[in-house]
Image: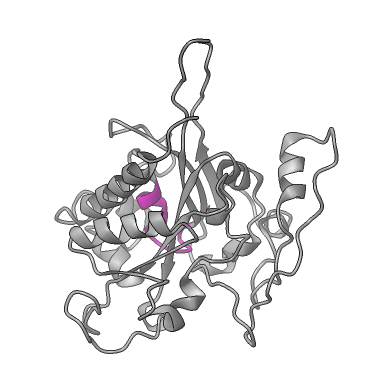
Amino acid sequence: MTPSPRPASRRTVLTAFAAAATAGAPLLGQLAAAAPAAAAADPGEYASNTALYKDPALVEGTSYGRRFKRHPAADSDLTAKAAYPRTAILALHGGGIEIGTSELALGIAGYDPGAVTDKAEPILPSTHDYFLFEGLLSSGNKALHVTSRNCDDHVALSLAASHLNVLSLHGCQYDQLGMPEPMEPMVWPPSSDPRLAVVGGLNAEFRAALVREIGAAGIPVVDAFDSRYLNRLQDFNGSHVTNPCNLTMLRKGAQIEMTTELRQSLFGDSGSRSRRAATWDASGGRFEAFRDACRRAIATVEATQPIL
C-alpha cells in the first residue's frame, strides 16, 4: 500500500527538500542527497530502507532480498540516435509483503515471473528495467513494509531518476478503500468479488492509458483522481512527491494499488512465493491479461516520448 499525505491524519506532509548534492560526491550519494527529505514513518514501520537495512536482526538474502535489472545502453554513432530505456517497473513491497507484486513486476518488465531465486530471463520481445524489494520471511513480512514516500534505496531511486516513466505496483485490502456497494456496472466490484485496481501517480496521461487498457481487459479499475472517487481514494493515489513513481525525469509517474482478491485471482495458487511462481500461467489467462494491459499502456505513453 502506498498512502498519500492528508491533513489531520497520521501522515506527515512533506515540507522541505534536502539540499543539493555536494560537488564531487559519488553518484549514488548525489542521488540520495538530491532527493526530498523523507516524511515521518507510519507507526510500527521502519523510517526508511536504510533503517531496515541497518537492523542487525535482519539478514539480506534470508529476511529480505533485492533484485534489479538495468539494461546497458550506449551510442557510438555520431549520425544516429540510439534507443534508450524510458520506463522502469518497481515492486517496493514484493515477496511476502504485498503478494503477487514481484511476479507482476517481472512479467510487465517482460521477464519470466516464475524466476524465484534464479536470474529472470526475458520471455517477451521487449523488456524494461526493474527493481524488486522482497520480503522473504516465513511469516510476518508486513513488518518489512517501508511506506513508499520514505523509500531511499539507492538503486530504486536511481532507476526512477533516470527514466521518463515509472510504474510502481502495490497491494491493498478492499475494505481499506472505503468503496460502497455497487453503484455502476463494471465500475464498483460487488462485495462478494472485491477485485479492483486503483491507478494513481502524478502522470495523468499514464493513468488514463492504464485505466483504459486494464478496463478493456475486463478487470475492474478506477482512476484514484476521478472526481467520483477522489475523496475515498486520496490515501491510495500515489501523489506524494517523494513516492519513487514520481521521482522520474518528468517528476511524475504511475502506480497501481491492487486488492488482495485481484492479486490472488492472477495466479493458479497464490498461497506462497513458490506456488505463485509456479502457477502465474495457470490463472486462465488473467495474469497475462493484466500484464499485457499494462504493457500496452506503457507503449502508448512511450510512443509520445521520442528521444530528443
> Residue 114, can we see it?
no
Q: Picture quarter containing residue 258?
A: bottom left
Looking at the picture, tell me which residue is in the foreground, 166 or 104: 166
Q: Residue at x 31, y 51 (%)?
A: 294
Instruction: Decide if residue 243 is on the left or right side of residue 166.
Output: right
Q: Is residue 37 magenta?
A: no
Q: Residue at x 51, y 53 (%)?
A: 134
Outermost residue on the left side: it is 284
Q: Does residue 211 appear to the left or right of 133 in the view shown?
A: left
**Which range is magenta?**
94-105
Residue 287 placement, left or right of 157: left
Up the image or down, 160 lies above or below 5; here it is above
Q: How is the image coloured?
A: one colour
Residue 193's x, y, as percent?
A: 22, 78
The image shows residue 15 at horizontal and vertical percentages of: 74, 69
The tally of labels here is: 0
- Judge from the rendering whether residue 245 lies leftward or rightward of residue 216; answer left or right: right
As for residue 95 lying within the magenta part, the answer is yes
State which quadrant residue 190 falls in. Answer: bottom left
Image point (82%, 36%), residue name = 25
